[in-house]
Image (cartoon, rainbow, N blue to C red):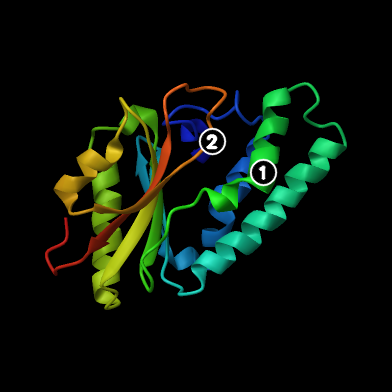
Amino acid sequence: MCCDTGFFGKPIDHIFCDRELFADLHTTPYLDYEPEWAFVAEADGRLAGYLLGSVRHDFPWLLVYEGSRTAMRMCSRSLKGSYDYHPRSRLYVRWLLTRSFRERPRHPPGAAHMHFNVAAAYRGRGVGLALWRAFEASLQAADIPHYYGELFSCPGRRPELAYRRYGLRIYDQVDTSVYTPELSRPVHLACVHKVLDGNGL
């Protein structure tokens, strides 16, 4: 599903054509190390959404480690010509290897982390909110007081404004060039943060 929503809620294919490795990049650090913090929503017999979480204090390092491994696999495939028919994919791999680690916002120390997606057909139907509530309830049961997530923001599409109603605030944000070929307006990668007060969403 992350491949279907990877570009501002739309498919990632025209930016990076290798769905297998794109999915590995965004899900492996969670599923390989903390599958117990994965929440899945089903509707009509289909996957409607998911939320992947991490409560490990070394998660940022796991993200770098696993991300680097996947990036090197992308690089290897690129050098072997797998992306010759799709020049934009080669640009994406170059950005990942040379700029991605410099274009990351700061994260609150000691906080849990979450990454979620909702299928287009189920947006606005409470799926994301249900996943979010389950995640927060689990954090509170584990006595974990705060968490953060990351999102892309640009003029005309600022999801952090909607998240304010649920208590999330911008902790840090940086300019990112990952979508420069597609978008002329500035794009930011924002870290949003919430301190749990016992009430949840």
Which label belongs to residue 177? Answer: 2
Find the distance from the CA under tag 2 to the CA under tag 1: 20 Å
Q: Position of residue 134 (x, y in %)?
A: 27, 59
Q: Residue furthest bottom?
A: 143
In percent of the image, x 34 and y 59: which residue is there? 148
Which label belongs to residue 21? Answer: 1
Q: Circle 2 — which element? A: loop
Q: Please tell me in which quadrant of the rendered image residue 197 appears.
A: bottom left
Amino acid type at mark 1: Leu
- Return the residue nearer the eye: 180 or 18: 180
Total labels: the figure holds 2
Quarter of the picture containing the C terminus is: bottom left
In percent of the image, x 69 and y 39: which residue is there? 93
Q: Position of residue 183 (x, y in %)?
A: 48, 23
Q: Position of residue 142 (x, y in %)?
A: 30, 77
In percent of the image, x 50 and y 31: which residue is there? 4
